[in-house]
Structures are given as structure tokens and as C-alpha cells.
Image: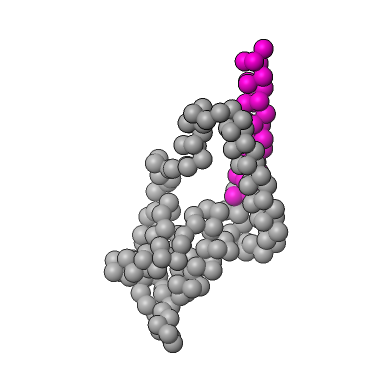
Amino acid sequence: MSLRHAVLGLLAREPGSGYDLMKLFDDSLRTVWPATQSQLYGELSRLADAGLVRVSASGGRGRKEYSITDAGRAELRAWLLSGPSRGARSEMLLRLCFLGQVEPAEARAYLRHQAELAAKELAELEAVERLVPEHGRLAFELGLRHVRVRQEWAAWAEERLAESVASMAE
């Protein structure tokens, strides 16, 4: 997935300014595809240059409202139907590949911290669950389940690592 397709997806629902889109990212996409303000505004410019969005209204202080074009809808549709990218990146999985390079106590602390972060994220998601519109329910539910599994896995991995270290000490 790319920021390009996330922006097109949001604009396919309804036109919006960069500010509106940033708020939508923070409210609904931050756990899926986070973006900074500079990334978002840069992507809007690239999408406009490519003819995938257009400025549909202008307001005070340079405010621009963007709408998706027919070419943008075609790009979004092609991406939606193409299937997932095989090159997905996960910083957490990459760290896990090299976790053996730190002391076992540090590795367990890292895993414990991951479980705590997931628990906090889960609480935040559960707090806004009732606000999720029906069209976003499938994605929200997958995100919720993913965070639950990540929390359970991190607690399991910390315990497993502790058992492994204990058995090596015997």
C-alpha cells in the first residue's frame, strides 16, 4: 500500500482539504498507514500533477479542497483489485530477526514493551470503536484483531525467551 492510494481512497469517499485529510488519517488510518503533514501535502501535489486529483475549491489562507478525478478512481480501482504487495515491510519483524544481538534481559524488556504498547493501542481502538462508520468496519476489525494478536504474541514471546534462558542456565 502507499500513501498515494490511501489519499485516493479518502478522496473517493468525499472531497477534502489537506487539513481534512490529515484529520481523517489521524482518526481512522493512523494504525494502518500513518502519515505526516509534510508527506500528505507532498503527495497531494504529486497526485494533482499526475491528474489523479484536482483542486475543486479554494478558500482563505491558501486552503485548497481536493477531489478525485476519473483517472484517480481508475488508479484506485486498479490498485484495489491488484492484490497485496509482496514487499511488505515490518520494522518490528526486522528487529526480531536481530534480537539475539542484545542481552536476554534487554530482549525480554523489548518484548514486554511491545505488549504494553499493543495494550495501549488496543484500549485506544476500543474507545473509538463505536465511532467507526459501517464502511470502515472491516478494516477496523482487522486492525483490532491484529493488535490483540500482537499483544498476545509479545507476552508469549517474552515468556518463551525467559524459559529458554532458564533452561540454558541449568
Identify the magenta region: 143-170
Q: Quadrant of residue 40?
A: bottom left
Q: Quadrant of residue 55?
A: bottom left
User: Residue 145 magenta-drawn?
Assistant: yes
User: Is residue 62 in view?
Assistant: yes
User: Is residue 73 in view?
Assistant: no
Q: Residue at x 29, y 69 (%)?
A: 49
User: Residue 163 magenta-drawn?
Assistant: yes
Which one is in front, 128 or 73? 128
Q: Main secondary structure of the magenta part?
A: helix
Q: Residue at x 70, y 53 (%)?
A: 123
- Please say if 158 is above or below 128: above
Q: Position of residue 140 (x, y in %)?
A: 60, 54
- Please say if 78 is above or below 156: below
- Give the position of the C terminus as an image quadrant: top right
- Please say if 83 is above or below 163: below
Which one is in front, 50 or 91? 91
Q: Position of residue 16 (x, y in %)?
A: 47, 74
Q: Residue at x 63, y 21 (%)?
A: 165
- Please say if 118 is above or below 40: above
38 vs 123, left or right, is: left
Q: How many numbered tags mark residues here?
A: 0
Name the image colouring: one colour
Which one is in front, 65 or 82? 65
Q: Residue at x 64, y 51 (%)?
A: 121
Q: Position of residue 124 (x, y in %)?
A: 67, 56
Which one is in front, 87 or 117? 117
